[in-house]
Image (cartoon, coloured by chain):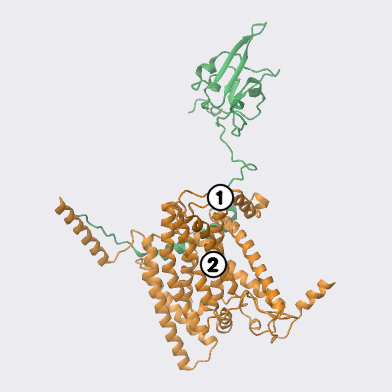
Chain colours: A green, B orange
């Protein structure tokens, strides 16, 4: 079985090196002087916008009195697929439940946002935030106080205009 | 007071027939010229790395380095980083050659500068100072001899690294540089024919009177430019480095300052090649559209102006180097070889014959030298360039893989496959 060599005749303007090279040079020099066309975002000074549905590190919302809104119902550690929420419920004299321990291991978290979705009190939220750095791995286990201290905006799980996603 | 007096003494216009400086002053001025050239050269090379990064960034719609001192100190930061890095010495390297190679690739590019005139002669109270470190009578031959040494550094680096990629890079570089060296040398012969002398000063003088060689010898300029790109291993001729194929080619195993030295050598080679193109084809320090810089009376201002003009010409070519680098992709190896041997070399040889014939015709017809000569050379060149463009445009010499093929070539390839099939069948 012989291998046949197929020869395709193409028009000269498709195969000419000179024309292609000159075209390329014209293109690059156009970009060279295109001062307004620069696309780099100067990161620490400028930041590109993130989606309102961005799911980043968590935040615990508080009541007007400054206490965590969490009622320690236990739904979020139950629904969490990564098992990263540690919750020990407690109860005060009036019978109100509150979290004795509420810790989220941000390294285990997969940022699915189920905790925010399941929370009946709208207490725990994933945040619109991505600049996380710590000196040790322990720094990424956020306790209740730390979660309450976060100030970044929280994720809009759905479009408020269109809650059913229609 | 003494300083201002000295400066005003330096700036006064002087007799055009001033004798050159001699004696102690000669040594002193030569030393000063060497120091100035070396300093400007090294600082310039450092800034060129920045320019390259900036231009590449702008071409790619980025900003480029703009953090260290608004970007201006980036070369210093890079240099500092390279000083702090570890000098690795991989197992199995040939140590003396491994250390020698970067030095050998760096020195020739620098040495070539000692014969390149960079300005009109400067008159001083001590005599005339020629603005060239050493005005060798063999000027141009010296440059050809020295720049061709550059290949040794790269080949030795490839050989001594004990690394297959480095060796392949070194091999490619030797093939490439040797091939293009010939075209480069051949392309300069018409210049020597026109100037009738190999000293760079007389080549510049000839251009100042008889028009720049880029008009007289356009084709030679193109050949020289392409060969210069190949000699400096810049894209589209960066096959010795070819990072997508050979990691980094001959500098794969180098680190820290030894790597830096190769880098400096590449840029130094670019500066030298640009200076040569400016000198040989664009009139060197000749100030365009003026004549008084050719005869004098020379003054210090004129010298400074001519230095500025020369620098501007060099910078233009450096920009061209970078512009081309960030536009054109690398040649395939067979394209490189066929361009060098099948196209540039025959073209350069034919061009020598053509120019010699035109010269003979001009001298026989008794047309006085000057503008008419330039016009005749120029029109001959326009015709040749148009013919060349038409030939190159056929896409047979440098063509993409899907380009047109010679019918004979196709027949030969068919024959090869047929024979291979027959051999395979016979074997079975």
Q: Is residue B60 above or below residue B138?
A: above
Q: Quadrant of the N terminus of chain B?
A: bottom right
SS for callout 2: helix
The residue that appears at 59% across and 20% down in the rendered structure is A103
- Label for residue B108? 2
Q: Quadrant of residue B239?
A: bottom left
Whether the residues at callouts 2 and 1 have beta carbons within 8 Å, the answer is no
Q: Position of residue B70 (x, y in %)?
A: 67, 52
Percent coordinates x, y for residue B224 in the rendering: 48, 72
User: Which residue was labeled with disc 1?
Assistant: B87
Neighbour class for label 1 at 10 Å: few (<14), some, many (≥20)? some
Query: Which chain contains the residue that carries disc 1?
Result: B
Q: Is residue B234 visible?
A: no
Q: Is residue A56 left or right of residue B329?
A: right
Chain letter behind tag 2: B
Looking at marks 2 and 1 on the same chain, the residue that comes earlier in the sequence is marked by 1
Residue A55 or residue B149, whichever sits in front: B149
Residue that appears at 61% across and 24% down: A142
Q: Position of residue A50 (x, y in %)?
A: 57, 36
Q: Position of residue B113 (x, y in %)?
A: 58, 70
Give the camera-side residue of B71 and B192.
B192
The CA span between labels 2 and 1 is 24 Å
- Residue located 64% across and 61% down the image: B43
- The quarter holding residue B186 reads bottom left
Callout 1 secondary element: loop
């Amino acid at each position: 079985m012989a291998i046949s060599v197929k020869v395709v005749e193409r028009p000269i303007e498709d195969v000419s090196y000179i024309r292609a090279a000159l075209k390329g040079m014209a293109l690059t020099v156009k970009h060279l002087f295109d001062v307004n066309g620069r696309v780099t975002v100067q990161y620490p000074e400028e930041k590109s916008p993130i989606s309102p549905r961005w799911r980043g590190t968590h935040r615990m919302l508080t009541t007007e009195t400054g206490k965590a809104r969490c009622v320690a119902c236990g739904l979020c550690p139950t629904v969490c697929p990564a098992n990263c929420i540690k919750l020990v419920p407690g109860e005060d004299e009036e019978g109100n439940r509150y979290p004795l321990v509420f810790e989220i291991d941000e390294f285990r978290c997969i940022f699915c946002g189920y905790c925010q979705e399941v929370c009946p009190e709208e207490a725990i939220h994933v945040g619109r935030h991505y600049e996380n750095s710590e000196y040790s791995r322990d720094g990424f286990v956020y306790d209740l106080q730390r979660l309450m201290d976060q100030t970044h905006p929280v994720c809009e799980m759905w479009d408020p205009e269109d809650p059913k996603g229609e | 007071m003494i300083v201002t007096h000295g400066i005003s003494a330096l700036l006064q216009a002087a007799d055009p027939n001033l004798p050159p400086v001699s004696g102690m002053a000669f040594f002193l001025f030569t030393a000063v010229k060497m120091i100035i050239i070396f300093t400007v050269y090294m600082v310039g090379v450092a800034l060129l790395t920045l320019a390259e990064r900036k231009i590449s960034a702008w071409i790619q719609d980025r900003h480029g380095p703009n953090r260290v001192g608004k970007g201006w100190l980036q070369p210093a930061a890079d240099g500092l980083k390279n000083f702090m890095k570890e000098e690795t010495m991989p197992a199995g390297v040939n140590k003396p050659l491994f250390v020698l190679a970067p030095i050998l690739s760096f020195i020739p590019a620098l040495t070539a500068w000692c014969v390149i005139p960079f300005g009109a002669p400067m008159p001083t109270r001590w005599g005339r100072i020629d603005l060239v470190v050493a005005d060798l009578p063999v000027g141009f031959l010296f440059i050809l001899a020295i720049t061709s040494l550059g290949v040794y550094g790269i080949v030795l680096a490839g050989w001594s690294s004990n690394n297959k990629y480095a060796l392949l890079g070194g091999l490619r570089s030797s093939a490439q540089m040797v091939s293009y060296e010939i075209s480069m040398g051949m392309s300069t012969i018409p210049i020597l024919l026109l100037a009738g002398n190999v000293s760079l000063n007389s080549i510049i003088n000839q251009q100042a009177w008889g028009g720049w060689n880029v008009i007289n010898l356009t084709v030679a300029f193109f050949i020289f430019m392409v060969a210069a790109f190949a000699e400096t291993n810049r894209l589209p001729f960066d096959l010795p480095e070819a990072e997508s194929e050979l990691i980094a080619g001959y500098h794969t195993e180098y680190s820290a300052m030894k790597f830096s030295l190769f880098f400096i050598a590449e840029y130094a080679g670019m500066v030298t090649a640009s200076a040569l193109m400016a000198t040989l084809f664009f009139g060197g320090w000749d100030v365009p559209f003026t004549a008084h810089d050719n005869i004098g009376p020379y003054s210090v201002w004129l010298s400074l102006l001519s230095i500025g003009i020369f620098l501007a010409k060099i910078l233009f070519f450096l920009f061209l180097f970078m512009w081309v680098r960030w536009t054109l992709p690398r040649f395939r190896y067979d394209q490189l070889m066929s361009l060098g041997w099948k196209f540039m070399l025959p073209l350069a040889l034919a061009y020598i014959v053509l120019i010699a014939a035109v010269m003979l015709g001009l001298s026989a017809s008794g047309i006085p030298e000057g503008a008419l000569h330039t016009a005749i050379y120029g029109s001959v060149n326009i015709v040749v360039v148009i013919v060349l463009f038409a030939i190159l445009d056929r896409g047979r010499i440098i063509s993409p893989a899907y380009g047109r093929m010679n019918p004979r070539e196709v027949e030969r390839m068919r024959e090869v496959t047929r024979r291979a099939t027959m051999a395979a069948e016979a074997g079975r």
